[in-house]
Image: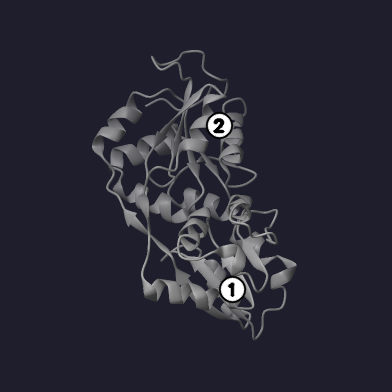
Amino acid sequence: MQAMVDHTIPTGATRSGARWTLISLRPQGQQAALRRAVAGRGGQVLALPPWRLQRLHGTPVLRQLQRALNCDRVVFTSPAAVTAAASLLALAEAQRSPWLTVGEGTARALQAHGVAEVHAPQRMDSEGLLALPVLADVHGLRIGLVTAPGGRGLIAAQLQAAGATIERADVYQRRLLRLPRRTLARLAHSAQPWVLAVSSGEALQHVWQQLPPTWQQRLRAEGRVVVASDRLGEQARSLGLRHISRSAGPTAAQLVAAAHATLTVPAAT
């Protein structure tokens, strides 16, 4: 196993024409934006999806959502949360208070459903959301969280610690997937360098636990990692991953730009 010492873009390509590979941990069927961004930079995407997304339906889910949307503040944690909520009721007619999102992708999803006023942080993660002025003083407020089971635990915990009451509406769920061995076989024959894109700590943990020890060691030695937040960088380091760079945010364009930059400059460690 040879350590990386050459940080230039490789000139050799696979039969597909790709010169490097972005390893995606996005949900099943959510790779299109990454593939478009990577194709313009001479690479290819190999997906290791940790789960698939499934909308939740029924009267109890609708009632949960209605209670959440009637709160003093409402937080949508992902574009999938917006899509699932919109399948249950008309969002544009439901807004009664400030609505917030973790990132611009979720904000765009709300705007596409006719929601005009959306608060989104420049720093697109849980910490950025919690720093928004509209959440500066939440003591005694009811805050709706439109989300899925698991994930974004920091948001609810911090808001509750500040004196808010959380009204949670789980409108979709993540169905965990097993990692097919044939996917690792494809990765073994894919163009190097390999750059692992991490925008979810849960996704990284779930996929990492399924990797055979030989593959974990190989990624520690040969892989580069791009993370969407400092917290994710700490998690990656705790797994023994070393060649870690920080992207400007979690969008496909931001992750791919940072991944491509690692091909020409040494990654941070």
Identify the residue position indicated by label 1 in the image. Answer: 158
Residue displayed at 25% across by 33% down: 182
Judge whether residue 19 can be spotted in this image.
yes
- Dot 1 amino acid type: Gln
Q: Residue at x 43, y 56 (%)?
A: 202
Residue 211 quadrant: top left
Asked which quadrant contains residue 59, the reply is bottom left
Which image quadrant: the N terminus? top left
- In this view, the residue farthest toward the right is 133
x and y, in percent, of residue 231 in the image: 56, 56
Please state if 115 lies on the left or on the right of 196 as rendered.
right
Q: Nearer the viewer, residue 168 or 70?
A: 70
Q: Which mark is residue 37?
A: 2
* Figure check: 196 above or below 86: above
- Sequence-wise, which precedes: disc 2 or disc 1? 2
Q: Is residue 267 visible?
A: no
**Left or right: where does residue 132 sit relative to residue 165?**
right
Q: Position of residue 111 (x, y in %)?
A: 63, 54
The crowd level at tag 1 (other Cα within 10 Å; few <14, some 14-19, many 20+) is some
Q: Residue, x 30% and y 34% (percent of image)?
A: 183
Mark 2 residue type: Ala
Tag in front: 2 or 1: 2
Asked whether, in this view, residue 76 is left or right of residue 96, the answer is left
Cα separation, mark 2 vs mark 1, equals 34 Å
Outermost residue toward the bottom?
140
Residue density around tag 2, few if under 14, some if 14–19, many if 20 or more, within 10 Å: some
Q: Residue furthest left?
A: 181
Q: Secondary structure at mark 1?
A: helix
Could you tell me residue 47's position as x and y percent? 39, 37
Q: Label 2: state its secondary structure.
A: helix
